[in-house]
């Protein structure tokens, strides 16, 4: 509480005679202090930062795809998971004038370590002719329009990982090993060269022989 000192007339007269009289009065209501000041207010609580709360920015998963054949820039490209063939072709500078762009399904979803081969018009014509030949009894179904088949057999030089897994005894791991060897050493000169791939022994190759070709 603030005290206001007021001198009355009597006090003024007393002061003239050397004495002092003080009259204390209550301050006006509007001058009363409630006791709450700006300094007494508690600051608002700060929201914890994303780092303090343990939240981190999520990075989308990526895949690596080998694009080759009748494209302007052959190479291995990184794309977001779930990308499609046409997006990989865009990174490779698009197809050349000799490319048969209708042979490959450009809307297909890509997978990691996949090889996208775009044939020329001449190559595509030969591939379509080979696919028109009836498959031998017991040969694996390869599906129309696949770029990894020739004469009803799976071409180990052009087949992607999904097609390679249709070869007896070849799982995802061996399919990736075949593609990795092919990318490093070039096309297989014969089907027997498949035994140079780690994990494929002579016994395993004998089970594959009738289902594969190297062209």
Image (cartoon, rainbow, N blue to C red):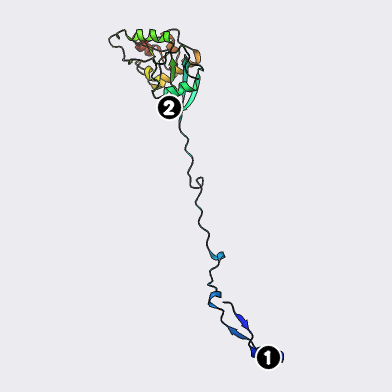
Q: Callout 1 environment at 10 Å: few (<14), some (14 to 19), or many (20+)?
A: some
Q: Residue 136's image quarter?
A: top left
Estimate the spatial distance between the alpha carbons at disc 2 and disc 1, rounded to whole Å: 100 Å
- Estimate how packed mark 2 is, as few (under 14), some (14 to 19) or many (20 or more) residues with alpha carbons within 10 Å: some
Give the left or right position of residue 132, taking residue 89 as reference.
left
Q: Is residue 99 left or right of residue 16?
A: left
**Residue 114: percent from the left, percent from the top?**
43, 21
> Do we see residue 20 in this rendering?
no
Q: Which residue is mark 2?
A: 83
Give the number of the mark in front: 2 or 1: 1
In what element is the residue under mark 1?
Answer: helix
Q: Which label sits on residue 13? A: 1
* Residue at the image position 49 percent from the left and 26 percent from the top: 78
Whether residue 98 sits left or right of residue 203 in the image: it is right
State the residue in front, 94 or 67.
94
User: Could you say where residue 12 lies in the image, as x and y percent from the top left?
Assistant: 67, 88
**What residue is shown at x 55% (from left), y 78% (from top)?**
28
Q: Is residue 11 above or below residue 126?
A: below
Of helix, strand and loop, which one carries label 2?
A: loop
* Residue at 52% over, 62% down: 42
The percent coordinates of residue 150 (x first, y second) are 37, 9
Dot 2 and dot 1 residues touching (CB under 8 Å) = no
The earlier-in-sequence mark between 2 and 1 is 1
Q: Nearer the viewer, residue 61 or 179?
A: 61
Query: Do we see residue 64 in this rendering?
Result: yes
Residue 8 picture location, percent across and down:
63, 87
Residue 111, quarter of picture: top left
């Amino acid at each position: 509480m603030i005290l206001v000192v007021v001198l009355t007339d009597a006090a003024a007269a007393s002061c003239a005679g050397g004495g002092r009289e003080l009259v204390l009065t209550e301050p006006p209501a509007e001058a009363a202090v409630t006791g709450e000041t700006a300094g007494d207010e508690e600051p608002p609580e700060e929201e914890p930062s994303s780092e303090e709360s343990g939240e981190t920015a999520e990075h989308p998963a990526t895949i690596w795809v080998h694009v080759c054949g009748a494209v302007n820039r052959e190479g291995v490209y990184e794309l977001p998971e779930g990308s499609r063939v046409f997006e990989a072709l865009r990174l490779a500078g698009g197809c050349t004038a000799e490319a048969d762009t209708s042979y490959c399904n450009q809307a297909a979803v890509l997978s990691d370590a996949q090889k996208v081969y775009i044939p020329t018009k001449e190559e595509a014509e030969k591939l379509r002719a080979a696919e028109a030949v009836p498959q031998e009894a017991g040969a694996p179904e390869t599906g129309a329009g696949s770029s990894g088949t020739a004469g009803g057999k799976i071409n180990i030089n052009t087949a992607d990982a999904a097609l390679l897994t249709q070869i007896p005894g070849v799982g995802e791991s061996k399919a990736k090993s075949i593609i990795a060897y092919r990318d490093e050493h070039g096309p297989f000169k014969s089907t027997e060269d498949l035994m140079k791939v780690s994990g494929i022994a002579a016994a395993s190759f004998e089970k594959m022989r009738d289902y594969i070709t190297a062209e």
